[in-house]
Amino acid sequence: MTPRPATVRIAAGQGFWGDWLEAPYRQVTGGPVDYLMMDFLAEVTMSILQKQKARDPSLGYATDFIPLMERILPVVAERRIKVTANAGGVNPRGCAQAVAETARRLRLGGKLRIGVVTGDDLLGRLDGLLARGHELRNLDTGRPLSDVRDRVLSANAYLGASPVVEALCGGADIVVTGRVTDTGLTLAPMMHAFGWRPDAWDLLAAGTVAGHTIECGAQSSGGNSLVDWKRIPDLANVGYPIVDAAPDGTFEIFKHPGTGGRISVAGVTEQLVYEMGNPAEYITPDCVADFTTIRLEQTGKDRVRVSGVRGRPATDKLKVSIGYFYGYKAVGTLVYAWPDAYEKARAADGILRQRLADLGLTFEAVLTEFVGVDATHGPLARATAPLDQLPEVQLRIGVRSPDQSAVERFTREIAPLILNGPPSVTGFAGGRPKPEEIVAYWPALLDKQMVTPCVEVVDV
Amino acid sequence: MPLVELAHARSGDKGDTANVGLIALKPEYYPILVKHVTAARVARHFKGMITGPVERYELPNLHALNFLLHGALDGGGTISLKTDAQGKVFSTALLRLELELPR
């Protein structure tokens, strides 16, 4: 048995699919780390990936992961840095295969093992589950899934850290998963390195808090940080956060020396409350973490210590993320210039709405925003803005409907306003807006015993 | 007194609900937030911008309050037509709140 390490360093490399491509490379080369954790999956990402897989069975994973891994594989192989990532989407095996091919091309064959975590994908099992009385009611509306069953595009249970731990125990250097929770990708290395038991609730809660702290990448190291934002140094060179975890569940957040950004109690607090529900009940498949027990302390420059975290037993349910086809939407914009910019934009909105009505088009929703006036803070901003002196205003109008043709017709009603509406209008370089299919999100719960994660570890 | 002088904030989304974490700029400001920035006061502040109720949770350990603004995002996520479909700037919208503090 390998000796337990004194601490384990887990670096955040991606906070979402589309995050900074430089971050993973900088994390594995900027100083010593033990693990690189990367989160790729947002709620509706799985539906997009299911569509891609339907067109080509070898796809269905986060394709950006492959060139990203190509760049870092020589470093992680040499420095024995392990990687956990939910880039597998709805095809973790396909993703692992693509990583393996890349590794072999880089002459790393025989030097790496890849773990694959599946079992989260419920799309093919839905009818069986419904038939057995699992209604998968919408957590927000209470409606049973049978309401939209024929429109479901993806269905995935959120798996926790355990299958990732199993892959690491099996010797995996790179663990590619489907819908594993963001926090599980950070907790798993700690459970593996320190031998934490799956019912050590305080420790699991601490690891979950660590995961939440770094799962959005630079959001805990100075990015999108409101407090004292003007004086946060060198964001161009921002260092992504790294957890330095101890076996007792305490950990420190830091970043590599010489990088920009800032790690402060105030900034970490901002990330802790991000997307927070009831702070005493942060529910994951692994445990229930109590965020009201967290203690933060600045222990050095760009170093924050986190301690005191308490947890409670995990529930007997797993959250299920279901994506279903909802309808269509489109958003069009035009820019109006001084003088009377706001008045012109309002007049254009009135004309457009009248034309839509005259055409007999009806929509589930029509939303007008005036960017520069009320698009972010609504009436709170409108009340104090110098409405008659604004240098410019963007009219932004969106429609939503189950009827594709109504949305399509709307998209043709924007451009005419340039010549046949109010004056001083510009900003139409992007062309006609495109109708978009809406894939809506249906959150539900399912008995844990209905989901069995599957773990494979393969040699490259 | 404008709330922006007492607190900073970050917001995010969960479906059609926006959350705003409101954090005291100094620990001694936290009791002021607890006393004056009530769920009812925040609901009044966002009148016309949200369709559901406001819930408040306290995190004295972080000198922070967490507000859940239900029905804030025009259906939320991909359904929403809003610029701020994910509730990212409800944070600073809350900081516009003016507190009537005794002298």
Image: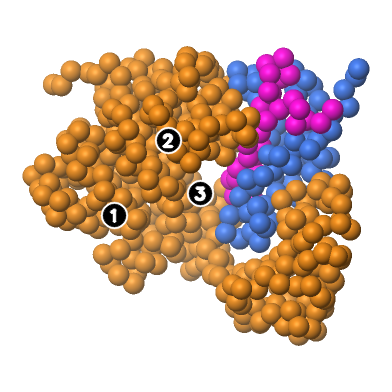
Look at mark 2 in the image and give the residue it sits on. A240
Give the amino acid at mark 1. Answer: Pro
Q: Is residue A375 visible?
A: yes
Category of crowding for the residue at label 1, using alpha-carbon neighbours closer than 10 angstroms: few (below 14), some (14–19), many (at least 20): some
Q: CA distance from mark 3 to mark 1?
A: 34 Å
Label 3 element class: strand
Q: Which residues are magenta?
A: B1-30
Chain corresponding to orange in the figure: A
**Residue occupying the point 35% across, 18% down:** A246
Asked if residue B96 lies left or right of residue A182, the reply is right
Label 2 element class: loop
Residues B53 and A260: in front is A260
**Residue occupying the point 78% across, 20% down:** B32
Q: Residue furthest left?
A: A110
Asked if residue B57 lies left or right of residue A124, the reply is right
As for residue A314 lying within the magenta part, the answer is: no
- Give residue A444's mark: 3
As for residue B5 lying within the magenta part, the answer is: yes
**Is label 3 or label 1 in front?**
1
Per the rendering, the colour in which chain B appears is blue
Look at mark 1 in the image and give the residue it sits on. A67
